[in-house]
Image: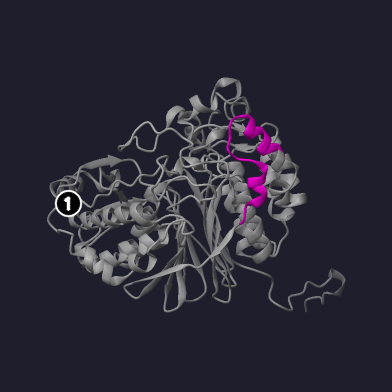
Amino acid sequence: MQRDTWRSRAGATFECEKRPATGRRGMVVTNHPLASAAGAEMLAGGGNAVDAAIAALFTLSVVEPMMVGIFGGGTALIRLPDGKEVVLDGLALAPASAKPDSYKPISDTWPTYMEVEGRANAVGAGAVAVPGNLMGWCEALTRFGRLDLATVTEAAIRHASRGYPASSYLVGAIEANAADMLRDPAIASVFLPGGAPLKPGERVLQGAYADTLRTIAAEGPKAMYEGALGRIAAEELAKQGSFLRFEDLNAYRTIDRTAVRGQYRGFEVVGPPPPCSGGVHIAQMLNLLEGFDIAGIGFGTPRGVHLLLEALKIAASDRRASTADPAFVDVPIARLMSKDYANQRRAEIDLQRAGSFTAQVLSNESANTTHVTVADGEGMIITSTQTINSLFGARIMIPGTGIIPNNYMYLFDPHPGNALSLVPGKRITSTQSPTIIYQGGKPRYALGLPGGPRLYGSAMQAVVNLIDHGMSLQEAVEAPRVWTQGQDAELEEGFGAEVRRGVGDLGHPVVSVPHVAGGMCAIQFEPDGSMVGASCWRADGVPIGLGGGEARAGTLFWPDYRRTPAR
């Protein structure tokens, strides 16, 4: 496949592996082609961006089952055609019977600080938190969509019942987690039939899950949160040692939150507030970088990478200390996002040497998530990150339902008394970073990606790529990334040995990695009303744009018998 090479003024180069899509009537970008197609079908059938996004998410729960499901949690940043924004918080929370000391930690020091005896917070029923995905998806559809639940779930049901070919990406996830999954007969029967992982191209059949989706299409979210489906799930999980009870499902509510807003070189950068940390800390990092000539230093130079790493470390240290569920922790949002605070912290950055900012972020947030970014021709935008946390969540399946539950309990600090400690009813803290960027008061970009703790730093780097380095959308999402929390400095292999040596010479303990975070899904909005969509090589992402439209008004086709013979 032909690739486009990007070259910076400083001489750094990388190749784009994918191509963007263009459209005027709408754009759907997801991390699987069948999910993008499901969303595009909703737009083609008269639906809006929310209809398309929810259809895509239900489909992703089938074709990206390792990443997302109805028993997970997530966040959506929605811009309505009138310019109003809504952050719909459907994040998971701790069950009422869970206590700060419910797990027995095996260590008080990094890197095993978050681990507990028997991996009880990571694998199996004991790792399952109260899910918000299904309620969040259905509420978004009811409040902001045009189509009904039966319509937007149709593609997901079809792919679950008729099957779809397993991608190498899915098969790799199965192989990596086979040992855990083989302990649970229900999940093994689908993804490891006969005890061996599916092979690329084999059809994935999920008949029980298709039946579950049919029930939801008919009954709505009540099936899970008030009805028989929820009772079956809760009773089965309780039998296996879960803290979750049907009463937790019945009590779950989504929360509407107010987006946070930062300013960067004349652009307005909008994201979700805590318990999502992305919006706050992306703004914080951009504030730090705004004091440097990032464009002049250049993309992919040792000094440019050094500044990204220092900003990441400062944000990571503050995130650990202060960012959590605001119902339980007083998060100093205004201070963290202020230009004055950035000026104060920027003075700690040494241009010649790596600094130490006490940045051991204690988090088990998984990189294994999914994201959709969708826009329609009427001005509605939705950028939404959704997950079951780790690959295949708790790595079990609720028998007879096809449901793969989350392992969100893995995100709570098992040591009592800290910002991220486990408390009944507390929402998990996430780096989810669905982002909309405005220029002159109008949307210019919308983006997001999966990636756990590496997620918000990757979103920040995309903003810098677009604004400082003048990259195209495709270049910005595919460009090599970096990440650190204060330990190793991870540089994607795309930077090359010379850059890694230069960054190491500045005092960073450099590690070369295949990729940082996951597949970004982004849309660019042009002044003429058209859109560009882009996905990156780090997932099975595909953008689909809608152009064209109805025939010109007054276009008619006359019957043959009324044609006038040529003279």
Residue at screen point 70% across, 33% down:
400
Residue 529, given in percent of the width and then of the height, sits at 52, 74
**What segment carries the magenta color?**
232-253
Q: Position of residue 514 (x, y in %)?
A: 34, 41
Q: Is residue 118 placed above or below 86 in the rendered structure? A: above
Q: Residue at x 58, y 30 (%)?
A: 191
Residue wearing tag 1? 354
Depth check: give the residue in front, 439 or 341: 341
x and y percentages locating residue 567 in the rendered image = 78, 79
User: Residue 18 versus residue 100: which sits nearer the camera?
Assistant: 100
Q: Residue furthest top?
A: 194
Work out whether residue 497 can be spotted.
Answer: yes
Q: Is residue 471 visible?
A: no
What's the residue type where badge 1 is placed? Ala
Q: Residues within 10 Å of mark 1 (few under 14, many from 20)?
A: many
Residue 90 percent location from the top left of the image:
57, 55
